[in-house]
Structures are given as C-alpha cells and as structure tokens.
Image (spheres, rainbow, N blue to C red):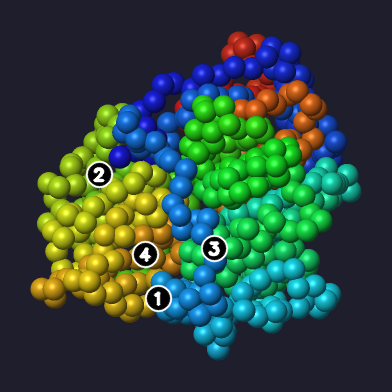
Amino acid sequence: MSDTAGEAKLEVKQASKEVKESENVAEKYSAMTVSKNSDMNMGELSSAFSAVPTHKPVKKVAFCSHQQIQFVEDKQEFSRFPTKAGRRSLSRSISQSSTDSYSSAASYTDSSDDETSPRDRTQVNSKGSSDFCVKNIKQTEFGRREIEIAEQDMSALISLRKRAQSEKPLAGAKIVGCTHITAQTAVLIETLVALGAQCRWTACNIYSTQNEVAAALSETGVAVFAWKGESEDDFWWCIDRCVNTEGWQPNMILDDGGDLTHWMYKKYPNVFKKIRGIVEESVTGVHRLYQLSKAGKLCVPAMNVNDSVTKQKFDNLYCCRESILDGLKRTTDVMFGGKQVVVCGYGEVGKGCCAALKALGSIVYITEIDPICALQACMDGFRVVKLNEIIRHIDVIITCTGNKNVVTRDQLDRMKNGSIVCNMGHSNTEIDVASLRTPELTWERVRSQVDHIIWPDGKRVILLAEGRLLNLSCSTVPTFVLSITATTQALALIELYNAPEGRYKQDVYLLPKKMDEYVASLHLATFDAHLTELSDEQAKYLGLHKNGPFKPNYYRY
C-alpha cells in the first residue's frame, strides 16, 4: 500500500494576479538566500508567496476507492472524563512503565511520581503560574539542556528566528498546537514565541512526549498539557485544556494528525469559526481537512504542509530511513541480517524504511495497492506480494500506509512465534490492536512500549508502542530533518496570519515551489554547499527566472 490513494492528479488553480505578485517578491527572497549579509523583511513575507489551492488530495496515502478517513464519532471521545482512580488505573493498564525508557526521550523521568496522574497534582513554575500540566516541573533544567542540544542542529530555524525577531510577524497570534512534544518541537515553539505569538500546546501522541522538555517549555510560560504515557482520556482532556481556557481565544492552529482541529470543530464551533488559519503536517490530518472542504464544512483556510516537497522528501523519506532502525534496535535488540521483513506501503515513508532494512541485509517484501508505487518497488529490487501469501514466514511487519486494519487479527493469528509487529504511520489504526484485547490472549509488558501478546498455545508476538508511531514513541528522530519541517511550518503560519483578506478562501492550500526552495536553501549552509547560478542566457533558454522557482508546481522530485 502507498501513502495515498490513487486519486486524480492535483489540480492547480491560482489567479494570474497572485502568480505575478508571488514571482516578483520571490526574486527578493532568492537574492537573500544567495547573499550572506542580506536581512529578511518579514513584513513582506505575506506577499512573498501565495499558496496553491487544491481540491483533491495529493497522492500520499493509501486508500481503497471506497474508503475514507472518517471523523471519529466514538462516544469515548466526548464522554465525561473518568474519576481520578479510574484514570490512574487506565493509564497503568495502557502503559505501566511508560515513564521508563531506553531512549533519551525520557532519560530524566522521575519514576517516583508514576502512581500519581499529573491531573491530580497542582504544580507551579518559578513565575507562579500553574497554567500547565506536565509530569514534573522540576525536570526543567534537564529539558533546557535537551533543547539547547537540538538548537545546534537546527541552524536554519534559529536563523529565521534571529532575522524576524525584531519585526514580530506573529504579534497578536494566539497559536494552539497539537504535535509531538520533543526538543526539536520546543525549538519551533520558542521560535514562534520569539516572533510574537502566544502558544498553548498539547501532544498528538500519548507516548512521544519528552517529559523534561514539556517541563522546560512550561517554565518559560508556554501552557503545555502533555506527559509521556497518557491514557486516551488524558489525551482528550489535554486537548480540551488547551482550547477551552477563560480569557484566551486562539486564532491559529498548528496540528499533526487533525485531532485538535476535529475536537475544536466538534466541541467549540464558535471558537473554530474565528480561526484565521490551520497548518497541518500529517497525511491523516490533511485527509481530514480535504473531507471537511469537500463537505463544505471547512470555514477557515488551511495550509497542507504534509505535501510540501521539503516535508515529503526529507522528513518522510530520510527521517524514517534512519529512525526505523533506531526504534527497532532500542526496543527489541533484533539482528536484521537475513530477517524476512514486510513493509506495508511503498510511499516516501515505506521507501525510507526499505532502504535502511535492505542495507542491513534483510529480505524485504512490499505490499501495495498502487501500481505505480508497486512498480517502483520492483525496480528497486523488492518483491511485491499480498500479505496473506507470506504471513506465516515473516519475522517483522512494518505498516506505513495511513489506512486502517492493514494487519488484521486473522493475520496476527497466523504469524510465527517471536514475530515483531510495528507501525510507522501517524495513526494507530493500521494494526488491529483492539482485536488483541480479548480474554484468551495475555498481554505481558516486557519493556517500555514493548508488549508480548501470548496466545493459548504459547506463541508470542511482539507488539511495539501498542501500534502507535514507532520512531517517536520508542526512540528519537534526526534533529536536522525536523529543522526542515519546522521551518516550513513557521513560514506557513506567518503567511496565513499576515495574508491580506481575500487571498485565502475556505479551502486547503499547498505551499508554492518558491517557498520550498527557500526552506531548502536555508539548510544548504550546514553542508557548505554552493549552488550553481544560471547565466542570463541559460535562464532565457530554459524560460526561468535566475533565482527560481526552478520547477513547476506539478514537478515530482
């Protein structure tokens, strides 16, 4: 399966006036990226580019033609929150040792507070504020060190912060965010604050929060509601606390997965209507936005960061190529040489995973629904199969499709003893974990985020992170790659917030090629890379401007 359904080609529609406006200012930005001493006029950023509206999802997620991501209407989402004792019991049953970790992501966690939910304790930072809910505010010092380390490899984002800090392009912006809360995300959040924004933040994954980083952010005044090992009810409670607070009206959303957008749309429609823009970075969240747009229910403009080139080709591909092995090694200590691995989905995430596994000597199989991605897999030397054909012989299954029930209970029943099952997609719907919570199966927690599912005959299947995103739940991800995504997100927020009225309608937009090129250019200095410049004659021959954009919007890298 691929990262998107085989849907119709992207339709690009952009008024000629906006195109000309974008091209004129684009020259300024290209010139700035060439000159080391040039300064960025962030006040002009709004006119620097006009995003491309789209009405059909770009090919990034696998869906059968009859399947769509549905807004979750389950009663558990909007039911009343459980009692204190119930929350503690549920949290322990989901992640009994969630605060113990074999990764640096939770290396400073104090296990002495495990029995007490952060919701049951009132903590105060050094400024006397209690408007946050984290595991332990005393971990601030360790979190600050993690953030400082991340800053060293996020020079482009820091550069953007320094250039724009004096102009405060986000002054007056009240941003509510729902992303992974890691040291890298903290650098982005503190950049947004430095540019004038007020921020309230929560986590998009119950296992990916770095507790010490959440504490460090809370100490600086950012209202953070998140901790590693939340229960499902904690997860929705944290989102609600970010949105529903007296005297604070959010006007911008930065989302990863669409849960925050969905919650606000369903629970607080009046608040949602006052939002000036949404920036979404995940496949799942983008498809939710397209569904809202198609139904005529999207009442605010949204920016699709997931399908920007700098997100797809770097975060999805290169990040997963390195972090898939890190997550598997830390949790299982598995030897990959000779192992038979099936990767479900050969989109950018799947391609990254397969490249890493092949390099270590694994025998890699691919499952796909898209013939184009399937052909790519064949040409890259992988065998494309149906999962049922090889399920009995597989050592490791990795899902990365964005779909649901990619691995079913019937297939899990047929897997051999000791098999490993994990997910590299954003959502935990790809593996049918719910079907494993039955009386005849025994769950045994052997490590943080590592469960042995034991069948009556003694067979064990190793499930990682309860089917949630492996790399951010069980390890860390490369900081440099996240700098690229974070810079794109920051620029998208600045653009939506400062855009003149009427530029963006109630639709989903793509970043233009010029902005992707600008983000990429900011990161070249790290490698001491030097771009070749076109001569006037060459530019005229190709029909391009000397400073870009160098590819049309429909170009596929």
Q: Can you tell which of label 1 and label 3 is closer to the viewer?
A: 3
Is tag 4's residue or tag 2's residue first in the polypeptide sequence?
2
Is tag 3's residue or tag 4's residue first in the polypeptide sequence?
3
Q: Can you tell which of label 2 and label 3 is closer to the viewer?
A: 3
- The crowding category of the residue bearing disc 3, from other C-alpha atoms within 10 Å (few below 14, some 14 to 19, many at least 20), is few
- The crowding category of the residue bearing disc 2, from other C-alpha atoms within 10 Å (few below 14, some 14 to 19, many at least 20), is many
Is tag 4's residue or tag 1's residue first in the polypeptide sequence?
1
Residue at image coords 84%, 75%: 127
On the image, numbered disc 2 is attached to which residue? 366
SS for tag 1?
A: helix
Where residue 448 sits: x, y (%)? 41, 75
Identify which amino acid the numbered label 3 is placed on.
Answer: Arg
| Dot 3 and dot 4 residues touching (CB under 8 Å) | no
The residues tagged by marks 2 and 1 sit, at their Cα atoms, a distance apart of 34 Å
Residue at image coords 83%, 32%: 44
The residues tagged by marks 1 and 3 sit, at their Cα atoms, a distance apart of 20 Å
Where residue 529 sits: x, y (%)? 62, 43
Left or right: 230 as drawn, with respect to 198: left
Q: Nearer the viewer, residue 229 or 232?
A: 232
On the image, numbered disc 4 is attached to which residue? 466
Q: Can you tell which of label 3 and label 4 is closer to the viewer?
A: 3
Q: Can you tell which of label 2 and label 1 is closer to the viewer?
A: 1
Q: Is residue 391 above or below residue 552?
A: below
On the image, numbered disc 1 is attached to which residue? 93
Identify which amino acid the numbered label 2 is placed on.
Answer: Ile
Identify which amino acid the numbered label 4 is placed on.
Answer: Glu
Residue at image coords 69%, 17%: 19
Q: Determine the residue located farthest toward the right in the rendered image.
A: 166
| Dot 2 and dot 1 residues touching (CB under 8 Å) | no
